[in-house]
Image (cartoon, rainbow, N blue to C red):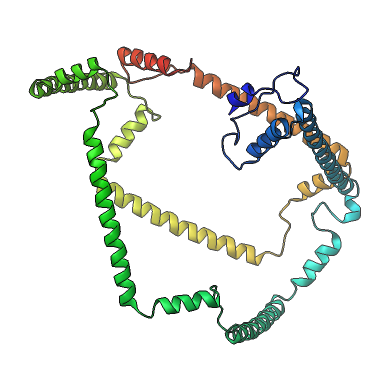
Amino acid sequence: MEAALQAAPPQSSTATAAPVKWASSGAGGQVAGTPRQNRILELHRMHFVQKKGHHAVTASIEAKCKEGRAADAKSCKEHREKIQQLNDKIADQFKNAMAHGSMSVWAKHERDQIEEARQDPMEAKERMVKHLREHTKTYDAQKLAMTERVRGIPPMNVRPKAELEEIEAARQDPQEAKERIEAIMAHRKTTFMQQRKVMSARVQATRPTSFRSKEERARIEDLRQDPEEASEAMKKKLTHLARSYREEQVVMTERVYSRTDETQWTKEEREAIEEARQDPDEAKEKAKAHMKNLAQAYKEHQSGIVERVKANPPLNIRTKEERARIEEARHDPDEARETAKAHMKGLHRNYQEHKREIHERVHANPLVTFRSPRSQEVVAQKLLRDMPR
């Protein structure tokens, strides 16, 4: 399509304008019905069908770009306004923390409402159960009325009355319809057999043709003269390949076994593991007993924690020093913000240094491969051949 559009002669007075290059590939460029394809066809019709010239196409493209830039500018402005509103709200919350009651996301009147609502959970539960029962009754009544209305509507058919009458008349005599279909099928079979005979005669009357040259046909004929010899040659080749593969597999296995053991366990830990796994049944029983003891101790510990928690009066999760520090920190929100920023920068710097150290350690390790030098050379040559020119 691109070559045809570029080679088309100019149809307008703007013959001296630069040639137009129409895109024919990319995001949806070759798929019909996509927005990109529709835009390309619209520009093509404007230039060649409506004969408005290259200037009209350029003006349309510039207008579309201008609309897009305006939409992007509007979106950016709305985003900046939204971010500014959020920053103002956060700054107001920091500066007027005492007026709002605390640094909680809930306002004081909202916390009072929550506190009031949770005073009697049984009453709230009964009210919710009553509300759900009323909803169930209303739904059942509406469902019953809807079912009665649907059943009261007469049956509707997508076919018109005339078509229904034709179907009714056609199905009155199935034997006659069967005989008519059999006659049609017999006629079609006779016609097909006649056409097939004529076609076979034409095919047999034509001269044999081939897409291969005379030399290729002679080479194929020469190759197929002795199938036994070709079979023996193929068997020899497969035997040689199998022997080479086994030899390469043996060499690879020897290289793998010749490498030193790489494990995350130290020698003492491996000896301890080896000693521990001498009697798997005994180790299994010991592990079961150990897990039972741990479970029993955990249950007793949890029971003690629950009893102590229930016996203690309600306490704040923060200590007195933490509360004093929070109270001191929220008196100056700007200072708290600067401290948090400095802390985050320090964390980011430490993370970057740690990440760089990890990369240095990883890249310092030598590359390990199980391929022989010959195999690596073959793979490299294949990759070079497959690379695009």
At horizontal 65% and vertical 37% (from top left) the residue drawn is 36
- Residue closest to the eye, 270 or 336: 336
- Residue closest to the eye, 60 or 274: 60
At horizontal 35% and vertical 29% (from top left) the residue drawn is 268
Q: Tell me which corner region of the image, top left, top right, bottom left or bottom right, holds residue 296.
A: bottom left
At horizontal 23% and vertical 45% (from top left) the residue drawn is 197
At horizontal 59% and vertical 36% (from top left) the residue drawn is 28
**Quadrant that contains the N terminus:** top right
Answer left or right for 340 relative to 233: right
> Where 19 sits versus 161, above or below?
above
- Residue closest to the eye, 358 or 60: 60
> Where 263 sits versus 233, above or below?
below
Answer left or right for 158 relative to 102: left
x then y, percent, for residue 387? 45, 17
x then y, percent, for residue 287? 35, 50
- Residue closest to the eye, 161 or 113: 161
x then y, percent, for residue 356? 60, 22
